[in-house]
Image: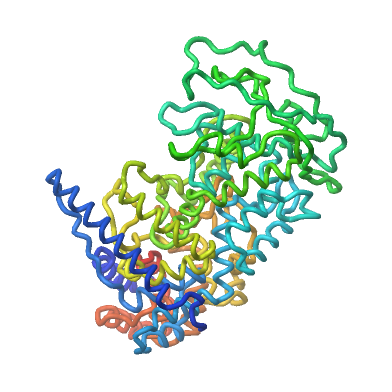
Amino acid sequence: MRAHITSLSLVAFVLWVPSCTKAAPPPLAENKLTSYTEQIDRQLLDLENQREAGLAKYHREPRKLALEEATDAVFLRRAYLDTVGHIPSADEARAFLADGAPDKRAWLIDKLLADPAWAQQRFQQLASLFRVQDKVLGASQKSYIDWLRAAVEKDMPFDDLVRTLLTASGSLETNPATGFLLRDHGWMPATVTETAWAFLGVDLVCAHCHDHPFADWTQMQVYQLAACFGATKVTVGPLESDESTRVPKKTASPLFPGGRKVGGTRSRAAAKPPPPAAPNELWPAGTTQQRALREKNLGADEHLELTDVRGGSVLIPANYKYRNANPGDRVAPAALLFSKSETHNAIRERIRIGPGDGRSLRADFSEWLVTHEQFAQTFARRIWNSLFVAPQPQSGIEPLRDAINLAAAERASMANMLCNSGCGAGPNADRWIFALPVNDMALQKMARLLGSIARETRFDAREMQRILMNTKAYQRTAITLPMGEDLVFQPAPVLRRLSADQVWDSLVSLGGEAALNEGVDEEMRFTRDLPQTPAPEHSLRLLGRGSRDWPNDTIAPISFGLTRWMMNGQPVERAANVSSSTLKKLDDLFLGILCRAPSSAERTAAEKHLATEPDDLPSVAWALLNTGEFLFVQ
C-alpha cells in the first residue's frame, strides 16, 4: 500500500529541494535589541562582501548565495525547533500563518523563549557540552543532573554557573555542583582539557600527551592548568590524611620557550619518586594504584569527594619528554596566554601561587576564566552555532547493532586513553566548525562583537538567543555550501538535519506520549524524561545522540541506516498512525507535520491515493514524515 503513496513523497521532496538551495514583552529595550541586531546583520554583510571580493581577486566563481527571507512557514518551524525542540502543532501553525501582524515573528520568539520547554532544550545543550552521564563509576548522577536543570530553569547567568562548577567542594550528596569536576574520576588533566574547550574554545587534546608541531599549546600548559586544582584533593570518601602541604615552586624556563628536546628520551630512572598518597586519594596522586581506583565502580556506601587543602601540587610525570622540566618537578599553576599583550606575570598576579587553600586557588582560576574575552566569545559563538551551523556528520554511521556497539567501544577506549595520559582525539564534530583563523580580521571582528553583546547581556543565554533570532540573517532561508567551505559566520543559517532530540520529540509531539507507547518497544517519552545516555541500540543513539564521552559528540548522520529507520521504525509508524487519526483533514496533516498547506501537486497525489484507499491517511502521514522537508531545517 505504501508503494501507491511513494509518488507523494517524491513530489514533496522534489518541490522542497529548490527552496532549500536558495508573550511577554522582551526584557531588552526595543531600541537596544534593534541596535544589536543591526550591528550583527551589518557585520555579516561586510563579511560576505569580503568573501566575494576575495573570490574575485583570485578569479574564482562567485558564491551566488540566494539570501532570501524565509517564508512564515519555514520561520515558524525553525523557531520552534531551535527553542522548544519540536515542531509546532497544526493549530499553532494555522494561528501563526493566519496572523497578519507585522511584528508576529518577534512576538513568537518571545513566546517560545518564555516556554518552559526552552529551558529543557538549553539543558540538553549544556549536558552535551559538559559530558553529563547518568552514572560515573557506577554512581548515579541524578542530583547533579537535577541541579544543572534547575540552574538553567532559574536563568543562572552562564559566568555564575561556571564559577559555581569550578569552585564546588564536597560530594554529590552535599553539593551536586561537584559533578562537573568529578566527571573524570578525579583525573584533572582530562577535566581541564575539556574545561578549556567548553569555556574557551581551546583544543588541548593533542597537548594532553605531547607537543604537537602544528598546535598552539603544549603539554606543559595542560599540567599548569591542572595545577590550578593541585590543592584540591579528590578522594573516594572523606580525605583520610593530608601530609602534602608543599608549596609549588616555579620550574626553570627553557632558553627558547616551547622548545622541544632533540635526541633520545629521558630515562625513566631519573624520575623522582612521587610523594606518598592516601590509599583513597585519586588526585593529585598519579600512581598506578590511583589509576586503578579511577576505573572501579563505587560501592553502595562509597562516593567521590572534593576537599580543599593547604598547599598541594602537581608533579611532572615520569614519561615527560621535554627539556623545560624534569620528571618529578612540581608544576606551578598558570593560565593560558592568548595574545602578546598578556604576560605570565600579569596572570600570576591573578592566580596566586603559594600557601593557601585549594578553593581560593580555584576561585582565582575561575575568575580569570569567566572574565577573559575568549570566554565571552566562546559563550556567544556556541549559541550562534546552535542556530546557524550544523555539526559535520561523520561518514559511515549505520544503525546496525554491531556497528553501534563498535563505535561506542571506540569512544570509550579513546576516553580511557585520555584519562590515562594517552592520546587520541574523539569523534567531536564540534571541533571541526569552531576554528577561527587568527589572521582573518573580519571574522575576529565579528567574534568580538558577539562577545561584547554577551557581556552586555550578562551572559544570559535566553537574551543572546533572542537577539540572534531577531536578526535578518536568522530569518533568511537556509543556504547550502560546497564541501569544505568555511562555516564560520555565514549570512544565513546553513541547511541542517534535525538533531536526534528534535526528531524524537517531534515524533512524540505528533502522537502524544501515551498513544505512542502502545505497540512500541522503546519508551516514547520526551527526551527530558529519558536517560542522558540511552543504550547504544536505542533510537536516539541511531539518530545521533552521543555517548557523552566527548563534549558535543551528538551528530546528525545522513545514511542508509537513517533512511531504513525512518521508513520502518516503530516510532515513525506510530506517529503516522496517531497523527492521521487526530488530524483527519489533509490540510491539517500537512500543517501538523510540515507547517504548511499542501501544494496543488501534493494535493492531487494525495487525493488520488485516498480515492482508492479512503482509510489510508496514515500512509499520507508516513510519506510526509519521510520527506527531506521534515528531516531538515530549511
With respect to residue 54, does 388 lie above or below?
below
In this orientation, which residue lies closer to the viewer: 408 or 430? 430
Is residue 620 at all visible to an observer of this figure? no
Q: In the picture, which quadrant includes the N terminus? A: bottom left
In the image, taking residue 134 as reference, residue 203 lies left or right, namely: left
- Could you tell me residue 130's position as x and y percent? 59, 51
396 over 354 or under it: above or below = below
Horizontal arrangement in the rendering, residue 276 relative to residue 255 (left or right)? right
Residue at the (43%, 57%) spot, across then down: 385
The image quarter containing residue 518 is bottom right
Q: Which one is in front, 250 or 438? A: 250
The answer to whether residue 120 is left or right of residue 449 is: right
On the image, the x and y values in percent for residue 530 come to 63, 63
Image quadrant in which the C terminus is located: bottom left
Q: Position of residue 257 (x, y in %)?
A: 48, 24
Q: What residue is shown at x 52% (from left), y 26% (from top)?
A: 210
Task: Specify whether 320 is left or right of 597.
Answer: right
Depicted 441 relative to depicted 324: above or below: below
